[in-house]
Amino acid sequence: MDQQVKDLINNEITNNEVCLFMKGTPGAPECGFSMAISNTLKALEVNYKGINVLENESLREGIKEFSDWPTIPQLYIKNEFIGGSDIVKEIYENGELKKMLENKGINFKK
Amino acid sequence: MAMPLKEIETLIKEALPNAIVEIQDLVGDSNHYSATITSSDFSGKSKIEQHKMVYNSLKGKMGNELHALTIKTKE
């Protein structure tokens, strides 16, 4: 992977507590799976940064290698890779996501 | 980009021989699937590791030939 892409990803996940690599933007997701995580974060009123991988082909491929994860969207919380849409859905439904946000000191609607 | 259901099932079972694999073609286009995989091999592993085991079994097809596969893993 390009060092520039690696630096870009590292910057984003370090400077934003909650960071979603997605297709489209939080206001206009361009994929159902990206929309699903976006909606979950919105429902929890979590402040997050959405990064549109469709605007940057090397980022789109780079994030897959960076996380060793073949699909997009990808959610990072406090520098930690949390998962894709299936995992986020599951941990939202079983309450683990809220616990995780709480433990990591992220503000959300309780 | 499409991939037959049988092929997905075969690949997962090759990698996880004791798994119970249930796959649904969600819209009938051989491109959007949902899979539930139950295997004792998942025990003690994080969700991320479990999903990676499934992705690895698909040998790079996920995100390429295979557009969308919703995964649910159970121990």
Image (tube, grey):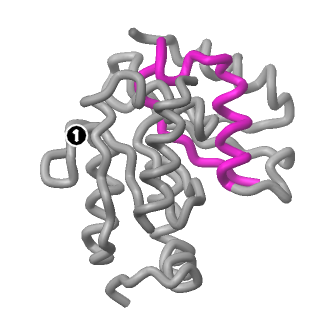
Q: How crowded is mark 1: few (under 14 residues within 10 Å), some or many (20 or more)?
A: some
Residue A104, placed above or below residue A48: below
Residue B49 belongs to the span the image colors magenta:
yes
Under circle 1, the secondary element is loop
* Position above or below: A1 against B70: above
Q: Quadrant of the N terminus of chain B?
A: top left
Q: Which residue lies furthest to the bottom in this view?
A: A110
Q: Residue at x 47, y 32 (%)?
A: A5
Q: Examine the image and state in which quarter residue A96 appears.
A: bottom right
**Residue B34 coordinates in the image, percent (x, y):** 48, 36
State which quadrant residue A72 falls in.
top left
Q: Looking at the image, how many numbered discs can be counted on the residues?
A: 1
Quadrant (top left, top right, bottom left, bottom right) of the C terminus of chain B:
bottom right
Chain containing mark 1: A
In the picture of the structure, the residue carrying the numbered disc 1 is A24
Residue B49, position in %: x, y?
Answer: 73, 47
Residue at (60%, 42%) from the top-left corner? B36
Counting from the top left corner in percent of width and height, residue A11 is at 46, 51
Q: Which residue is drawn at 59% across and 15% down?
A: B6
A70 and B24: which is toward the camera: A70
Q: Which amino acid does label 1 sit on?
A: Gly
Q: A81 above or below B10?
A: below
Q: What stretch is highlighted in magenta?
A: B47-75
Residue B53 locus on image (x, y percent): 73, 36
Q: In this view, does A63 lie to the left or right of B75?
A: left
**Magenta stretch contains residue A36:** no
Identify which residue is drawn at 49% across, 47% down.
A84
